[in-house]
Amino acid sequence: MAPTPTSLQRLHLIATGGSIMHNLALALHRRGAQVTGSDDEIFEPAKSRLAAAGLLPAQEGWFPEKVTPELDAVIVGMHARADNPELLRAQELGLRIYSFPEFIYEASKDKQRVVIGGSHGKTSITSLILHVLRYHNRKFDYAVGAQLEGFDLMVQLSEDAPIIIIEGDEYLSSPIDRRPKFHLYQHHIGVISGISWDHINVFPTEEDYREQFRIFAEMTPKAGVLIYDRDDEQVQLVTVPSSTDVKYIGYGPHENKVRNGKTVLVTKKDEEVPIQVFGEHNLRNISAAKEVCKQLGIKGKDFYEALATFKGAARRLELVREGSSSVVYKDFAHAPSKLKATATAFKKQFPKRRLVACLELHTFSSLNPAFLPQYAHTFDAPDVAVVYFNPHVLEHKRLPALPAAAVQQAFQRPDLRVFTDSKALAEFLHQQPWPDANLLMMSSGTFDGLDLAQLAAEITK
């Protein structure tokens, strides 16, 4: 019998502390499954959330004795290695082993699957769609990579929802399955929001990376829909209409106006819709979400009504604090294309204010000397541009030391400030003149614990 959220009752999650994996554990527990898990490191908020549900492992580490013949299945996260002792035990016992995307697919075989792919924007687009569907009381399941306002989990699997909205990550599915996650969901409606080379450790060339999106595009089935950014040159290379049985829909930025630092959308009926997000990349995300919602039966006026209350996904151009002459935002941006889009949008939104922008290099790609030249001129918009990285992260990822001069050269910005100590960075930011100035902090990390809330309070007072 094909597994569903309820047909598999005894499940063990290897690498249960991951962002999406711990949400899956909680979702399965909520459905009544008996869930166990292991991980060699579990951080907040996963630690507290698992503990509250009684799912926190008693000890960190890997324990093959947890994997027994009585289990219905094992789900393995990408954080685990191929030689993980629990994974080896599951293989030895011949247990059913799933990666996260395999399990989501099996649990949603009877649903209409909407998969949002792209190098950037996919979390925001997915969040927008979920917000609109929920606003209009539609039944849906989902799997998304960020915590959303009004949603206590990032994963929901139910028996009766007719559709599932999935954020389609292009990274590998598991340590024993080298296929990109978004190839496994088998979408009915697919989105490609943009393509910008990333994950250099897995896709060593731009062509290798782009090929994954071509495969995704060609997986669109008969009577399926492929929605794509019509202005992205890399997307244009993979979304050439190749099947008369597929509906191809290109989109661009939504028509808009900016007044006093606030963006309003202009509809086809010349009506104005105030929104709480800004920037061309978000205007494109809105267009993508609108096209998806249209395919799901949401009319334009209903889409705009819901959109007016959308505040954005957590850490995606998120307002930290606002003062009379300053604002502080944080963003998940780290890829070159997203960095350029966010910094440029911020400067356009507040053209009369000085912009101080900080980027933390945190991922394998962003710290790799072979990839760094991709950042050339992506950080030109800010008045003060700062790059931070922790040398210990380089050591952990087994990458060579990174001189400040090399970073300045890669970004093609001689006045770029480079910091490798978070306390020195904090001191530099404290000393900046903040009247009529804004701060933008961009990272997939935490700037090594920098207290952004305190800093924002001082900047905006």
Image: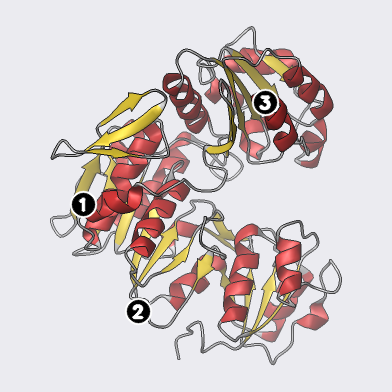
Residue name at image x 62 percent, y 36 percent: 365
Query: Circle 2 sits on which residue?
Result: 110
Mark 2 Cα-neighbour bin, 10 Å: few <14, some 14–19, many ≥20 = some
x and y percentages locating residue 458 in the rendered image: 72, 26
Mark 1 element type? helix
Mark 2 element type? loop
Spatial distance from mark 2 to mark 3, Cα to Cα?
A: 53 Å
Amino acid type, label 3: Lys
359 or 319: which is nearer to us? 319
Residue located farthest toward the right when viewing the structure as drawn: 59
Query: Circle 1 sits on which residue?
Result: 301
Residue 138 appears anywhere in the view: yes
Amino acid type, label 2: Asp
Spatial distance from mark 2 to mark 1, Cα to Cα?
A: 30 Å
Q: Is residue 145 left or right of residue 68?
A: left
Query: Circle 3 sits on which residue?
Result: 461
Q: Quadrant of residue 362?
A: top right
Amino acid type, label 1: Lys
Q: Mark 2 and 1 residues: CB-CB less than 8 Å, in contact?
A: no
> Which mark lies nearer to you, 1 or 3?
3
Residue name at image x 57 percent, y 43 percent: 315
Q: Is residue 25 left or right of residue 268?
A: right
